[in-house]
Image: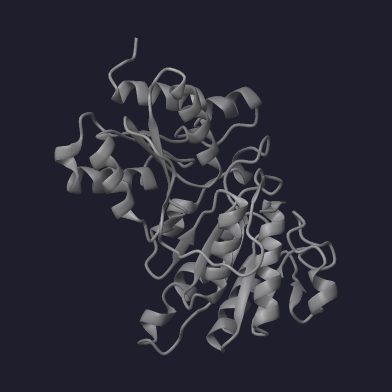
Amino acid sequence: MRTIEFREALREALTEEMRRDEKVFLMGEEVAEYNGAYKVSKGMLAEFGAKRVIDTPIAELGFAGIGVGAAMNGLRPVIEFMTFNFSLVAIDQVINSAAKMMSMSGGQFNIPIVFRGPTGSAGMLSSQHSQSFDNWYANTPGLKVVVPANPNDAKGLLKSSIRDNDPVIFMESEQMYGDKGEVPEGEFLLPIGVAEVKREGKDVTIVSFGKILKVAIAAAKELEKEGISVEIIDLRTIRPIDYHTIIESVKKTNRLVIVEEAWPLGSIATEVAFKVQKDAFDYLDAPVLRITTADVPLPYAPTLIEASLPNVARVVKAVKEVMYVVK
């Protein structure tokens, strides 16, 4: 199987879907002439032309609204935000128009639109460019929220998102675009709403998603050296959440740690913890623990960023706590 970058997997998904369906188009800042801020759309303007790969002004509210209107009229827009931090300017169109239109129209309008771009921290970008809004959007009925963690999932889930008749929030990471991974040749799709067991284990379950999954995997490798077997679940989709896969894993391991790049209040980790205590309480041998971003705006200094975000040491410590082996 070939190995390609995360950005290449996204580009393949977009290109294949635009070749398959002429109603699909891409719109956003710098997606055309500049080949995309992160080079996801490299070469697409040359193939599809300026009517289907559309550069916009710096006006997220405006082009998000154009996308919603286009979707209401039968097209399938892919709207790229240079970062989801900038999507706050457009959140009225995402929440009050795209997410609610089917309900408010009594089912007369589907909104087959994808809003995609990077989320979360990306190094020394400070407070206004480093926020994770995954759980914000997952709180909204009418949206589906997808957060892939590797090139394979990026391609398969983006293709499914573009074909979906509901609005999809598709969240990536600036720090993942260069990540490499195996991706099959040819046509393939992955179902929205299905988690993946990334690593089998018997002592404790770690649930995570997106780029922070790499921290969980690194922690599991460290714990393995000490004889602790960790099962890792990649949610891949946080609306809907695949609760079944989580519950079945907890029934086996009897312990759960959730790792998420988000502020703690109202996080996906909070929701997962509630669901596990509700449906698998009798299987738990320790309280559920969660590792989240510190409850502060993300600092600029690298040392403070490291202290604020989930890291391997914090995950290892949490696993040992639920294993009752902390010294």
In this view, the residue in front, 202 or 243, is 202
Question: Is residue 134 shown above or below 260?
Answer: below
Residue at point 32%, 33% (across, down): 202
Residue at point 24%, 34% (across, down): 254
> Which residue occupies the extreme left position in the image?
282
In this view, the residue in front, 184 or 247, is 184
In this view, the residue in front, 93 or 221, is 221
Percent position (x, y) of residue 184?
63, 59
Residue at point 54%, 37% (across, down): 214
Q: Quadrant of the C terminus?
A: top left
Percent position (x, y) of residue 43?
82, 67
Percent position (x, y) of residue 306?
57, 26
132 horizontally vs 233: left or right: right
Residue at point 36%, 56% (across, down): 241
| Among the 4 quarters of the image, the one containing residue 204 | top left
In this view, the residue in front, 241 or 128, is 241
Q: Would residue 59 be visible to someone looking at this image? A: no
Question: Is residue 248 shown above or below 93?
Answer: above
Question: Is residue 12 shown above or below 17?
Answer: above
